[in-house]
Amino acid sequence: MEMWLEGFGIAFQGQNLLYLLLGTTIGLVVGAMPGLGPLFGVGLMLPFTFGMPPATAIIFLAAVHAATAYGDSIASILINTPGGVGSVASCWDGYPLAQQGKAGLALGVSTTSSFIGGLIGWVSLVVISPLLILVALKMGPPEYFMVALLALSLLAMAASGKVVGGLALGGIGLLLAFVGSDPITASSRFTFGTDYLEDGLPLVPVAVGLFALSQAIILAEQGGTIAQIRSIGSIREGFGATLRRPMTILRGSVVGVLLGVMPALGLSSANIVAYLVEKRASKNPESFGKGNIAGLVAPEVAKNTCILGDLIPTFTLGIPGSSVTALFLAAMVMHGLQPGVDFFKASGALPYAIFAGILLAQFAFFLMGLFFARYFAMTVLVPNAFIVPLIVFLSFVGSFAMRNRVEDILVTILFGVLGYALSKRGYPAICLLLGFVLGDLTEANFQRSVLIGRGSYGIFVDSTISVVLLSLTILALIGPYLVRLGRSLLTKAE
């Protein structure tokens, strides 16, 4: 307890509070810009931490991280344009709410859910991380392959009635993920002799094209404004709407923690998987995509739980939970902090100061989000003639800014046209993106497992964890049919 009091004392020092507020402001601005996201925000700010005290540097980056992850959802809700890959699922019910004149409600739900998710993620970081790490340490390539397979089984639910089309798009996404270097042999494939494709297709331009640029084309066709009703609704309603869904919060937080603690899954998968899990658990799955509040609560809770869950393996094992936390690891090394046992035992009150700062970062973006939410919500009343050029500009800037390559803009345009075509025909582009996101994890761990098992596929059912995950995958695939059969039998019985 003494260490915690000393840690909070350090976090509340004037310099640390100043950088906390500065990081939160920068994070909100960066997060609201389509295509940038936490990776860009933390990466952009990392060089500026040189010369700062270690606690101040990590607190500053934590504030940027938390605020950017929350700010990502602003564009997702208001203009159906994900601020980053971690907010894709927030579009699906957040934007329909904005179209119905309930942008304020949606932003209130997003702010409250993000805050709750952040608090749950913080608790998992400082209280139950040892237990979660024990589970993660027992997972090898076969278990990670089964996790990816379980996530891919949710494609049928994401397909919104077009199961065959959804699975086909998921397969296409997997094929696109295979472009580049083989994860085991490093040999090139599907690159057509171009250096650009050696590292594979970049995730950010693909996601921005599918969901941001395609939306700009749709808005240009529609004209008018995003919300045809001259109202944004009440932001305060978002508090009650979120708190009335405790089971949704629980499911989203479990998904966020589990995917956060597993390296290589993280933010790009958490909000999508949480959305699909919530849709499967719902008694009215057909209402998802039409402004269902639970469809916004679940991904927002999962996303903000996950970004702190990502830090668990980073702080305790020195293994980055995601590309963003790899930057945190770089910041720790840059400031002379050694992750692992030494970080907790040989650094005095410093770890507790960092944890306190991370907690304060959640309150900072929550309060600032509430204060500015009404101003953000006014975006839905701006004519599409002004919104569309802004979306296109930010989409191109966001795609280009990550790697400074013009080819990334061309990829954004290509997938923007593809996303538009899929949307016009009613096919969910998310199936393609989910297959693409999970492609590397699926292939790499499949190949490693087969090598470890010396060509035997029995390795995939050797451990209890693998068997449980395989059972859940089978249940996810046949569950809807079993429910339908049960209802049919009950009807006949009556």
Image (cartoon, rainbow, N blue to C red):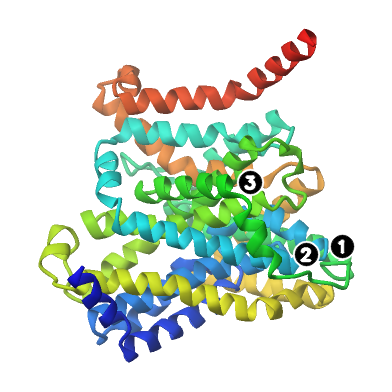
Q: Name the residue under label 2.
A: 102
Q: Which residue is pictured at 70% across the width and 43% down the height?
A: 428
Relative placement, left or right, of 40 versus 155 is left
Q: Nearer the viewer, residue 194 or 214?
A: 214
Q: Of label 1 and label 2, which has the lower sequence position?
A: 2
Q: Which residue is pictured at 25% across the width and 21% down the height?
A: 454
Q: Mark 1 points at which residue?
A: 221
- Which structural element holds mark 1? helix
Label 3 CA crowd tier, 10 Å (few <14, some 14–19, many 20+): many
Query: What's the CA distance linking mark 1 and mark 2?
Result: 22 Å
Q: Residue 86 carries which label?
A: none
Give the residue at the far top of this rendering. Answer: 493
Q: Name the residue under label 3.
A: 430
Give the residue at the far front of this rendering. Answer: 1
* Residue type, label 1: Glu
Q: In this rendering, is residue 388 above or below 255?
A: below
- Which structural element holds mark 3? helix
